[in-house]
Structures are given as C-alpha cells and as structure tokens.
Amino acid sequence: MLPDTAQEKPQRGKILSIGPGKLLDNGSRGKLSVGVGDVVIYGKYSGNDIEVAGKDVKILRETDILAKIVG
C-alpha cells in the first residue's frame, strides 16, 4: 500500500462539449450520464490532451470519468 503522498491525485474539469453517445449494437446511441457544464473527476493520465483555440483541453471517454460533482 502506498502512502497518500505517493499516490496520484485525480483531476477535476468542466465539460465543454459532448459527442452523440456510444453507438450501440442495435444502431442507436447510448444516453450519456454527463452533460455540458458538469464538473467531473478523472484520472491524471486519462484521455488525450489537445489544443483548441489556443487553450489546452482534454478529450475523455465517458468511461474515463470517475465521478460527477453534484451541487
């Protein structure tokens, strides 16, 4: 077991945009559990970093999201 000081801390971010949802076997799209404006927690090494309009952003799959902050 690692001490708290040695463990990577999860990251927090605000969702700026979402896609249409996962394509299901029947051809429909799955409903997303997050939406634009939601604040989420994700792993430090999750997703891909890109630059959009001069700002660094991260692209995540919904499965990379560990929690949604409510309230």
Image (cartoon, grey):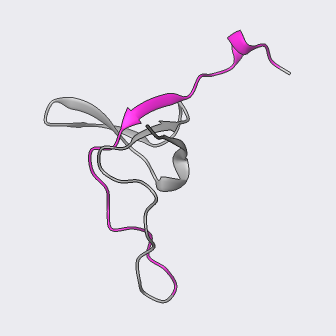
Residue occupying the far bottom of the picture: 26
Q: Is residue 3 above or below residue 70?
A: above
State the predominant SS element of the stretch in magenta: loop
Is 29 one of the magenta-colored residues? Answer: no
Foreground pick, 26 / 50: 26
- The image shows residue 34, relative to residue 10, as above or below, that is below
Total marks placed: 0
Q: Is residue 68 left or right of residue 39?
A: right
Residue drawn at 43 percent across, 47 percent down: 60
Does 32 appear above or below 53?
A: below
Q: Quadrant of the N terminus?
A: top right
Q: Position of residue 18 (x, y in %)?
A: 31, 56
The quarter of the displayed image where residue 19 is located: bottom left
The answer to whether residue 42 is left or right of residue 35 is right
Point out residue 51 in the picture as x, y percentages from the top left corner.
24, 35
Asked whether, in this view, residue 70 is left or right of residue 2, the answer is: left
- The residue segment tinted magenta is 2-25
The residue lying at 13 percent from left, 36 percent from top is 53
Identify which residue is drawn at 15% across, 30% down: 54
Q: Which residue appears at 33% of the width and 68% of the height? A: 20
Q: Quadrant of residue 27?
A: bottom left
Q: Please identify the residue farthest to the left as the structure is shown.
A: 53
